[in-house]
């Protein structure tokens, strides 16, 4: 039987033998007492890498965004956020549920940005009719797309000029940084710090393209992180010997940043392989996520195609628009098999 090619998400990766060894070897302590050396090392490292005073290890990106938003905002405040942003749409309304913080969703432009005019128009005056607008939340990469550096500078400058703080959901910050480094001939570390430098807080995931089994980090000032620690505790996120997980994240930072270029290349290889199929329109992927739209008479054939691929041990998501995510457990053979299977489905 063919191996499974799992293109549903970059969260599906399993820790390698080396990563597991690093986890087993990690020095441990009780992190709620601040005693876990592996957690402390990871937090210091990621804060330093991204140019922040402090960082806090989190169970997930959702927890990290939640603690970030609630550290910036009080009850009755609001945050400006993309209609299609993860921390508005895919996090169960957590900021509203747990923090009585109201999201003000704005339309995402095709590149993932929020129009500067929309941001300006959404910031409410100080008037008892309105929630207090406190925070702008952006996402990079957004659906695999890189937010332009200049845009992030402009948007965060605008937000600050109106007294707002700025949060980045950088679940895939390192995908953005690796791609940006290719364009600018610097290092991913340098680009990650440049992107992060626009924001007051950044959430980054270790459990996606970096390949760790669990975990994210929230970075910010010492003061913000102290508030986030209290909220994380309330959210049940005070973990004890979490160093086993932090060690995996540390291992990922050592070994899995630069190699993301391979994931990006495979997404392009997949897009090229799918080009020219009647009924399927692949986009040009910028990082590790490829979308392809079913068109014409194939528009309704999404579920049938997903099932056809599943029967061949190829896993994808989507219906009218298909989504393929590359990561460190997918190789060129898997991508070639995926292209061949889809071509077979369309009868060519
Ligand atoms: C995956 C993801 C998160 C967090 O997801 P968790 O599954 O909670 O770790 C946050 N933001 C974006 C953009 C994501 O893709």
Image (tube, helix red, strand yellow):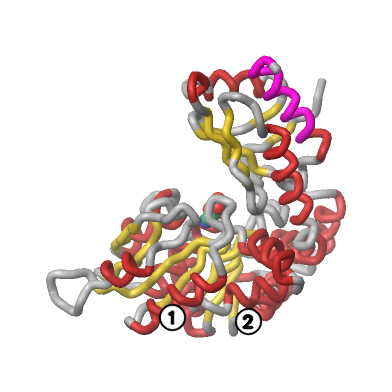
Q: Residue at x 64, y 76 (%)?
A: 193
Residue 294's tag is: none
Q: Which residues lie in the magenta part?
A: 335-347
Residue 157's tag is: 1
Residue neighbourhood size for the residue with mark 2, other residues' Cα within 10 Å, grouped as few (<14), some (14–19), many (≥20) = some
Q: Is residue 336 magenta?
A: yes
Question: Is 337 located above or below residue 56 in the figure?
Answer: above
Q: Which residue is denoted by mark 2 in the rendering?
A: 51
Q: Residue at x 56, y 63 (%)?
A: 170
In this view, the residue in front, 52 or 196, is: 196
The image quadrant where one finds ligand 1 is bottom right
- Which quadrant is home to the N terminus? top right
Q: Position of residue 84 (x, y in %)?
A: 42, 51
Q: Residue at x 82, y 58 (%)?
A: 24
Marks 2 and 1: which is nearer the front? 1
**Among the 4 quarters of the image, the one containing residue 304:** top right
Question: Is 277 located above or below residue 42 in the figure?
Answer: above
Q: Is residue 241 visible?
A: no
């Amino acid at each position: 039987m063919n191996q499974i090619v799992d293109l549903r998400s970059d969260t599906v990766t399993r820790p390698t033998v080396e990563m597991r060894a690093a986890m087993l070897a990690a020095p441990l302590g009780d992190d709620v007492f601040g005693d876990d050396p592996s957690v402390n090392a990871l937090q210091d490292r990621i804060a330093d890498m991204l140019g922040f005073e402090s960082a806090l290890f989190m169970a997930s990106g959702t927890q990290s965004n939640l603690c970030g938003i609630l550290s910036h905002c009080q009850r009755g405040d609001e945050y400006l956020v993309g209609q299609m942003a993860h921390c508005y749409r895919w996090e169960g309304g957590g900021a509203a549920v747990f923090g009585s913080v109201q999201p003000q969703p704005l339309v995402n432009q095709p590149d993932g940005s929020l129009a500067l005019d929309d941001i300006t128009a959404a910031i409410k005056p100080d008037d008892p009719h309105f929630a207090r607008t406190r925070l702008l939340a952006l996402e990079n990469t957004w659906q695999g797309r890189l937010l332009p550096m200049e845009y992030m500078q402009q948007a965060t400058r605008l937000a600050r000029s109106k007294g707002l703080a700025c949060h980045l959901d950088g679940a895939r910050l390192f995908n953005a940084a690796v791609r940006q480094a290719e364009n600018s001939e610097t290092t991913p570390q340098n680009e990650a710090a440049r992107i992060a430098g626009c924001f007051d807080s950044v959430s980054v995931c270790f459990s996606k393209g970096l390949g760790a089994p669990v975990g994210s980090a929230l970075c910010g000032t010492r003061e913000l992180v102290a508030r986030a620690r209290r909220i994380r505790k309330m959210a049940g996120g005070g973990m004890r010997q979490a160093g086993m997980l932090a060690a995996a994240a540390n291992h990922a930072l050592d070994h899995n940043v630069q190699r993301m270029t391979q994931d990006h290349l495979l997404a392009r290889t997949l897009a090229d392989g799918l080009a020219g199929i009647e009924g399927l329109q692949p986009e040009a992927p910028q990082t590790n996520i490829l979308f392809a739209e079913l068109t014409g008479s194939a528009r309704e054939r999404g579920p049938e195609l997903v099932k056809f691929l599943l029967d061949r041990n190829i896993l994808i998501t989507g219906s009218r628009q298909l989504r393929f995510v590359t990561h460190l457990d997918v190789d060129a053979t898997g991508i070639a098999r995926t292209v061949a299977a889809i071509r077979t489905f369309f009868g060519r």
